[in-house]
Amino acid sequence: MASIEPMDAEFDTVAEWTAKVVEGLGRQYRIPAACRGSGRPSALDWLLAGLTPRPGDLMIDIGAGLGGPAAYAAEQTGVRPVLAESESDACRAAARLFGVPVVRADATALPFADAVASHAWCLGVLCTASGPDAQRAMLRELRRVLRPSGRAGLLVFLAARDRLDNPPEGNHFPTRAQLTEMLHEAGLTETAAADPSSLPPPPAWWQGCIAAVDHELRCRFGDAPALVTALEQSHRIGELLRSGELVSQVIRLRR
């Protein structure tokens, strides 16, 4: 049997399966399921409060996955989202779920003009870059597509020490000092940061939607290597967060 690439399993194959499950369960499951791993409502609200978008503003979601956070932002503020996602199955699934523009693109080389967007965010994606050089390129691209004084948001997982126990494959976690240096090099100014765990938990209906989707995924695809691999990746991140070896932050930025 061919080996399963962990990043492809988590962000492509299982993303497509998640969309299939959501389509069977109903529209109310779309945004919670498509935000799994990339933002609880309170963290997204905290970021949006700093971005202060207006209805009709163009907002680029970099590494959008299934597009749940972008759809949440559109629902809450009226922004006009455009999704940039590198995995082909996730692109098709996001377009199907939310009917918004989706571009297949690597976050280190976005196919957008300079200064095209007033807002952008990149949620849980920086650690999936191949290393520090790719992370720097990702942040430079984030700045490049922003208009002067444009605002952006990050959700990042940061290493509390140089060497982590049993990190998930394919992930590279910067330290807080390394991230601060990369932001400065990219020309991005940090205006505020918060720990998502200090913000209110998701409402019960949101958690119920995610639990129902997770249950259905396991029922339909539980023995599939791709799902097993994706769950193991998620479990490893959870263990590192619980041990304190990883910390998560949401960060507001300005060009």
Image (cartoon, helix red, strand yellow):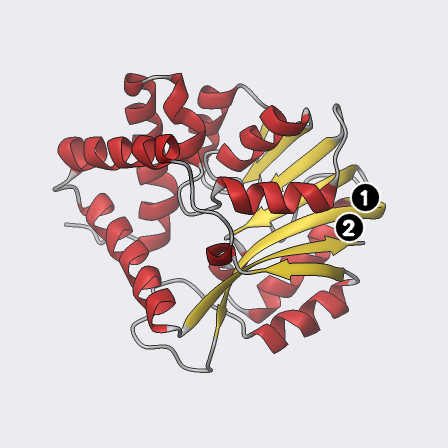
Query: Does residue 158 lie above or below 128 as drawn?
Result: below
Observer-nearest residue: 126 or 35?
35
Observer-nearest residue: 141 or 204?
204
Q: Position of residue 231 (x, y in %)?
A: 25, 51
77 vs 116, left or right, is left
Instruction: Categorize mark 1 by other alpha carbons within 10 Å: few (<14), some (14-19), many (20+).
Output: few
Q: Position of residue 153 (x, y in %)?
A: 65, 50
Q: Position of residue 38 (x, y in %)?
A: 47, 46
The C terminus lies in quadrant: bottom right
Observer-nearest residue: 235 or 114?
235
Q: Give the SS element for disc 2.
A: helix
Query: Does residue 101 lie above or below 38 as drawn?
Result: above
- Label 2 and label 1: CA atoms lie apart by 5 Å
**Type of amino acid under label 2:** Arg
Observer-nearest residue: 154 or 202?
202
Name the residue carrying label 1.
114
Regarding residue 101, the answer to whether it shows in the image is no
User: Looking at the rendered structure, which numbered label has been put on residue 39?
Assistant: none
User: Looking at the rendered structure, which numbered label has been put on residue 144?
Assistant: 2
Q: Position of residue 79 (x, y in %)?
A: 69, 28
Tell me where residue 234 sits by quadrant. bottom left
Tell me where residue 210 sits by quadrant. top left
Please name the residue shown 76% across and 47% down the image.
Answer: 151
State yes or no: discs 2 and 1 in contact (Cβ < 8 Å).
yes
Please name the residue shown 71% across and 65% down the image.
Answer: 183
Q: Give the SS element for disc 1.
A: loop
* Total numbered badges shown on the rendered structure: 2
**Type of amino acid under label 1:** Asp
Regarding residue 111, the answer to whether it shows in the image is yes
Please name the residue shown 58% across and 23% down the image.
Answer: 100
Instruction: Categorize mark 2 by other alpha carbons within 10 Å: few (<14), some (14-19), many (20+).
Output: many
Q: Which numbered disc, 2 or 1, marks the residue that appears first in the sequence?
A: 1
